[in-house]
Image: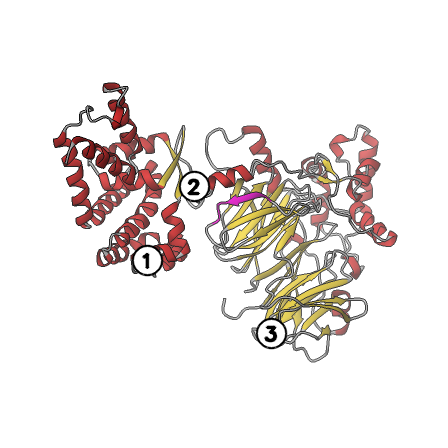
Amino acid sequence: MDEEDIEKAVMTYLKKKGFKQTELAFQEEQQRQHPKTALNSTNSHVDPEIACQILSFSSELENNPAQYHEGYGKLRSWAYSSLDLYKHELLRVLYPVFVHCFMDLIAKGHIQEARTLFNSFREDHEMMHARDLQKLEGVLSPSHLEEMEFAHSLRQSKFNIKICQYSYDLLLQYLHKTQSVVMLGLINEHINFQVSPGQPTSISDDAEVVTFMGSGQDATNLINQKEIHWGLLEDSLEERLEKAGALVPDSAKVDGEAREGEVEENKKRPYEGGKQGASLKKSKKDKVATATGKASRVETSTVSVAPRVKPELTLPSIPAEVEHSILEDLRNRVQLSSAALPSISFYTFINTHNGLNCASISQDGSLVAGGFSDSSLKVWDMAKLGQQTGYATSQIVEDSYPSDSLLGANSGRKSYTLFQGHSGPVYSATFSPFGDYILSSSSDSTIRLWSTNLNTNLVCYKGHNYPVWDVQCLQWHVNCNYIATGSSDKTVRLWDVQSGECVRIFIGHRSMILSLAMSPDGRYMASGDEDGTVMMWELASGRCISPLVGHTSCVWTLAFSCEGSLLASGSADCTVKLWDVTASTKLLKTEDNKTGSINRLRSLKTLPTKSTPVYSLQFSRRNLLFAAGVLSKNT
């Protein structure tokens, strides 16, 4: 082998293993010695002995699979024995190295060694990556790495890991000191470190500091640079009231007498439950809420600062009587904040015999719908429920604990309106904004439009060839110019309804997306996934501004309060959680995350249910929170 072949072999090896710094240093050395001929010249000199050692090491690495098990084992032991201050950051490196050690062994045909490595260390990663490990467990040959989409994307992509400067230096010192070339190559090729100054991030942030960066990251970044208009529609009802002064916060009013008059007026207003028309008596908590009214209104003027945009689609006109009703609700809206939490009413389905597939609540909370496996759609009128049955009516109770209204699917007397027409299980149901229509989807591949006023089916939409799982797989932006979609590919995307183009891609979830919600001013979006994680996104930048960690199971529903100060999340873990949006977004604006630490929404309250997974959440226009779920005997 002549010198030119040796040089080419060395360069090929360095590129293959991802030793970019070594490759650049090698090239610079050749150019310094022979600036004209560089690497293509036969006169350039490389020590044949060193080159042969590199090539022999490459051959040894190919034929010695035990180095992967040994190298990973030593790295793991070192990370676990590190100082507690840095240990949780150093442990983040282990999962990417583990999966790539496994896949490298598979790719080189060392199947048995790969299985041994996988089985020896998989327990370390079960809690955070159980679903990923289940997929990788099925990789049994080199061909599977190309055929399986998940494995192929891992091989072609990198992991983003956030780590402080000192932890990063400790890792490099270990790799160089122990001459862990195999581990160094894997880390260099498959991990992208985001090094931040200062102290290590909190150990509670570990679920969000390791993210998957696909091979199309450059394309994603390019898409996320597109301009979007996230504000409210021009001449909206909120804007009209704002101009009239009805939605101006107390802090903006100069006249002290006007403030006192408004407080007195608020004291006289009863809380109303939509069509129920039930005025509820004042409790002691109401007096406390009135006393904190000024503070809460100061915090909750998010709508007023949102820019105004023109609609790209022709929007339907609102009937005069409906507009009057909406304006009345907006005038009587309860201002919420961290000091004034919402009153909650929880509707519980009982005796469903595992037949309830979905639940939906109308905007004013007056109607509750359930889709069942026997192909039926049932709608309860909450105003009539207490009159016709012996069950408790909806009540708003103090201390923000949800009161239960029991909805019996098979009660002795018919307390609901039965809609029949589907020929298969009903998987989804959604009310129109004013509750006069409801859409349902079924395994019979159809979507049906029903009238709640006429109690009949109006239209049957056909065209799908397979079951329709949802009639709102998506979330409309408040200005109707964009649609957000969540997918099983763990991403959320924002689409322009006029052009059909994807204008934002939100990456960070580790499991499929199950729920979406838009803030009232259109600036933020929340998404919930199968693992119980909720993420808050800023639409303009496309970045995650705050992860919400606390649920232990699927997050099925999300809802922002009407002024955007609170976010409610409902989960299969039988809880409703309330999160403080205002405080966290203010912190983001003022500090701009200078320390590199993750900004986290503050959990205000966790409301446990009576063994009832939460299917649906809905804030009314007056800021009452309604929730629904089915009583589970298994929890």
Q: Which mark is residue 143?
A: 1
Indicate left or right for 350 with 433 as reference. left
Indicate the quadrant where residue 448 lies: bottom right
Of callouts 2 and 3, the N-terminal one: 2
Q: Is residue 365 above or below residue 30?
A: below
Magenta highlight on residue 505 = yes
Q: What residue does disc 3 label?
A: 373
Magenta highlight on residue 418 = no
Q: CA distance from mark 2 to mark 3?
A: 41 Å
Q: Nearer the viewer, residue 245 or 215?
A: 215
The reply to whether residue 269 is visible in this rendering is no
Q: Which mark is residue 209?
A: 2
Residue range highlighted in magenta: 502-509
What is the three-letter code of the residue carrying label 1? Answer: Ser
Indicate left or right for 18 with 50 as reference. right
For label 3, the crowd category at 10 Å Cα-Cα, with few meaning under 14, some 14 to 19 and many 20 or more, is: some
Where the N terminus falls, by quadrant?
Answer: top left
What is the three-letter code of the residue carrying label 3? Answer: Ser
Residue positioned 38% across, 37% down in the render:
192
The reply to whether residue 575 is visible in this rendering is yes
Q: CA distance from mark 3 to mark 1?
A: 41 Å
Indicate the quadrant where residue 423 lies: bottom right
Task: Label 3, secondary structure: give it.
Answer: loop
Report the coloring of the rendering: secondary structure
